[in-house]
Amino acid sequence: MRVWPAIDLRGGKCVRLRQGDYQCETVYGDDPAAMARQWVGQGARCLHLVDLDGARDGSTANFQAVRQIVTAVDVPCELGGGIRDEETIASYLKLGLSRLVVGTRALKEPDWFRQMCRRFPGQLALGIDAKGGLVATDGWLATSTTRAIDLARQFAAEALAAIIYTDISRDGMLQGPNLAAMAEMDAAVDLPVIASGGVTTAADVRELAKIGLDGCIIGRALYEGKLTLADAQAAAEEKIPAT
């Protein structure tokens, strides 16, 4: 299982939110490229980037910060937040991002998302952010009536790079991931699933790996020293005993 350190961008700075609340922000640095180099220097093999401004308003407000990160490091980087049209997809892929995460428009315009999956095979991931099992959109400011599992199944036959599944209630809370929800999602589709939200300890990483997930995203726990990247990666790569 791969470990994806998260770099969340807002106003060109590296920040973290609690449960997606834009009023509960902690700033961890004003140089995103330096932060990216820090994680890669500690052994990161991939990075998960989020444009929080874009997620909320559909803009590409942190385009230059993303460019600086991609230029600064030589590991695969994925980006989510505000990716809602073909022009934006093409622009970001041209920067050198490995893949892009689409959430809001995939829910609202599934036919468009299918078209994009076929135009950019293997370069798009479906971002599913859920509250109580229901899909949230627009930077987590709105909650739909669509079940996360049902949205995933809609696109199960497409050439997706992955499904990135975030439990908003756990995000930034340092209370552990929603293992039951992650296992349910992994069982529902034959696609790589990446867990996000609440990963705090090496034991959390180990449990997610046991489920058989493709990866996990870790944010606040790394930034606040609750978990080291080395320990997280060691837990992700442990051999699981045969049963």
Image (cartoon, rainbow, N blue to C red):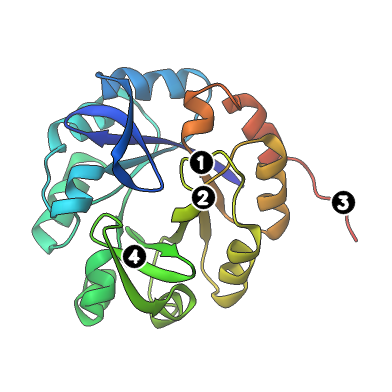
The kind of secondary structure element at disc 1 is loop
- Dot 4 and dot 1 residues touching (CB under 8 Å): no
Give the class, few, some or many, for how many residues have Cα within 10 Å of label 2's Cα (few <14, many ≥20).
many
In the rendering, at what x and y percent does residue 11 appear? 16, 31
Mark 4 vs 1, N-terminal side: 4
Disc 2/disc 1 C-alpha distance (Å): 5 Å
Query: N-terminal of the two: label 4 or label 2?
Result: 4
- Residue 241, label in figure: 3
Residue type at numbered disc 3: Pro
Cα distance in 3D space between marks 4 and 3: 37 Å
In the rendered image, which residue does mark 1 sit on?
173
Give the residue type at disc 4: Ala
- Depth-wise, is mark 4 or mark 3 nearer the camera? 4
Instruction: Label 4: state its secondary structure.
Output: strand
Q: Contact (CB < 8 A) between labels 4 and 2?
A: no
Rendering coords of residue 126 (x, y %): 36, 64
Q: Is residue 133 left or right of residue 210?
A: left
Q: Which residue is mark 2?
A: 170
Label 2 with label 1: CB-CB less than 8 Å: yes
Of the residues under marks 4 and 3, which one precedes in the sequence? 4
